[in-house]
Image (cartoon, rainbow, N blue to C red):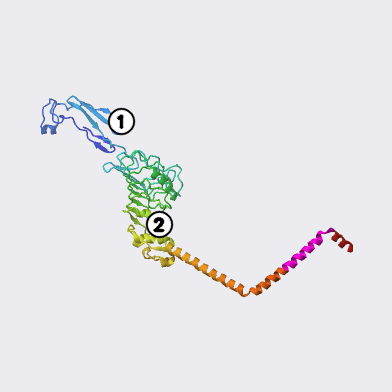
Amino acid sequence: MRSLACGGSGFKAAEPRGSRYHGPGGGRRGPAARRRGPAAGESPPRWPRPLPLNLKALGWVGSFSIMLDSSGPPFLLLAPLACQACPAPCECSEPARTVKCVLKELSAVPAEIPGYTRNLFITSNQIAPGVPTTGPAQPAASPSAVESHAFSALPSLRYLDLSNNRLVTIHPDAFNSRNNSIRELNLSRSFYNSSTIRPVAAAIIQGGFWSLSKLELTNNEIVYLPLAMFSSLRSLRHLDLRNNSLVDIKNSTFAGLDLEHLDLTLNALKTLRIEALAELGRQLRLRLFLKENPFVCNCDIEDLVSWLNQSQQVADVEKLACVFPRHLQNTSLMDLAGAELGCHSSQHSKNTLQTSYVFLGVVLGIIGMVFLFVLYLNRRGIKTWVNSTRDACRNFMEEYRYRYEIDSDPHITQVSTLDI
C-alpha cells in the first residue's frame, strides 16, 4: 500500500485484515511464499480501489479515502489534522509544534501558520509594512504592522516571540481571540521608536491575556508606561523592562498585579515615589531589580532610602548608588544619612518653622517696645512739634480761605480793577 504524503511527512495506510497472509483461495501462506510473492500462474492480489472523500468542508486539512471490502467493514485512511502547509519563508517542526520565521525579511506576520503551533518565533525581521530593508528608516505606509486577530487561528499558541523587529504599530485587536492561551510574550527590541508603546499598550489591554505569565519589553526606548497598561494581566508574574528610558513610575502602574520578578535596571529613574513604593510593597513575592539608574541623592530620595532600609524585596540593593550630585557620586543609597542630603524630615521642618515664627514675633515685640520708649523720652519735644505743626496748618488754611473769598466776590474784584 502506498503512503500519503503531506508537508514532507508520510502517513502509512493500514491494510485490510487477512490480506497479508491469505492467497486468492483463502488458504494461509507460509513465510517463504510471502517472500517469493505469488506462486507461478497466480495473479497478485487485487484490493478494492480507494474512493477519495474530501472532508475539507468539515474543517479538516488532510484528505481521506474509504476502502470498501466485502470481507470486512469500510476502512478509513486519513491524513491527520496536523498535516498542514508551512508558510514558505518559515521553518516548521510538527513534532516540536514550533514555527520559526527568523531573519526572513518579513514585512508582516505570515498567513496560514499551522494550527498545531505552540511556539512561534517571528524575530529579526522587518515587521513594518512600507519600510525598506535597506537605507534610512522610513515610517510605515500601512495603518498597522500586526493586523487585527493575527493570531486568532492558533488556539494552542503558548510562546510568541516578536523580538528584534521594527514594529511601527500594532492593531488593538492583534492578540484578541476567543481563547487567548499565550503564556509568554517577547517584544524585546521590537519597537520602531518610543511612540510605539501607545498601540502596544492598547493591544495588551484588549488582548485578553488571561494566561500571560511572562512579558518582556526590554531595549525599546520606552519613556513612560501608559496608565492601566498591565491592569488586565492578572496572571503576570515576570515583567522585564530593562534598558529603556523610563523616568517615572506612577502609583497605579503595577496596581492589582502579583509580580514575582520586576526588572527596571538600566532606565532613567532618579527616584521612586512613595505611592509607587507602597504599591510594590503589597506584592509580597516580588523580587525587584533597580541597578544602573541615575539616582539623584537629594531630599526627594529620602522616601526611597527609607523604604530600601525596611524592605527585603530589592534583590540588588547593594548595587544602588548616587549619580548626582557630584560630591555624593557612587555613594550607596543604603549609606545615605539626612545630614548628607541637607534636608530634614517633614515633622522636624514643621517644628523648625514654628520656632522661626516665635523668634520673629519676639524680635518685633522688642523693636516696638524700644520705639515706644524713645517716644516717651521725647514727649515734650514731640508735643512742641505737634503744636507748631498745628499752628502752621491753621495759618495756611486761614490764608487760603481769605484768598478764596476775595476771588469769589465780584464787587471786590471790580473795585480792584478800577483802582488799577
Between 266 and 53, the residue placed more toward the observer is: 266
In the picture, the disc for residue 200 is: none
| Residue 400 seen by the camera | yes
Residue 41 lies, in percent from the top left, at: 13, 26
User: Residue 376 appears in which quarter of the rendering?
Assistant: bottom right
Residue 208 lies, in percent from the top left, at: 36, 42
Asked if the magenta segment contains residue 53, the reply would be no
**Identity, as a three-letter code, of the amino acid under mark 2:** Ile
Q: At 56% from the left edge and 71% from the top edge, which residue is drawn?
A: 369
| Label 2: how many Cα within 10 Å (few below 14, some 14–19, many 20+) | some
Residue 198 position (above or below residue 43): below
| Label 1: how many Cα within 10 Å (few below 14, some 14–19, many 20+) | few
**Identity, as a three-letter code, of the amino acid under mark 1:** Leu
| Residue 243 seen by the camera | no
| Residue position marked by numbered label 1 in the rendering | 58
User: Residue 85 appears in which quarter of the rendering?
Assistant: top left
Residue 316 lies, in percent from the top left, at: 34, 59
Q: Which residues are magenta?
A: 392-410
Between 67 and 264, the residue placed more toward the observer is: 264
Q: At 27% from the left edge and 28% from the top edge, which residue is drawn?
A: 53
Total numbered badges shown on the rendered structure: 2
Residue 16 lies, in percent from the top left, at: 18, 30
In the picture, the disc for residue 274 is: 2
Residue 33 position (above or below residue 220): above
Q: CA distance from mark 2 to mark 1?
A: 59 Å
Q: Secondary structure at mark 1?
A: helix
Front disc: 2 or 1: 2
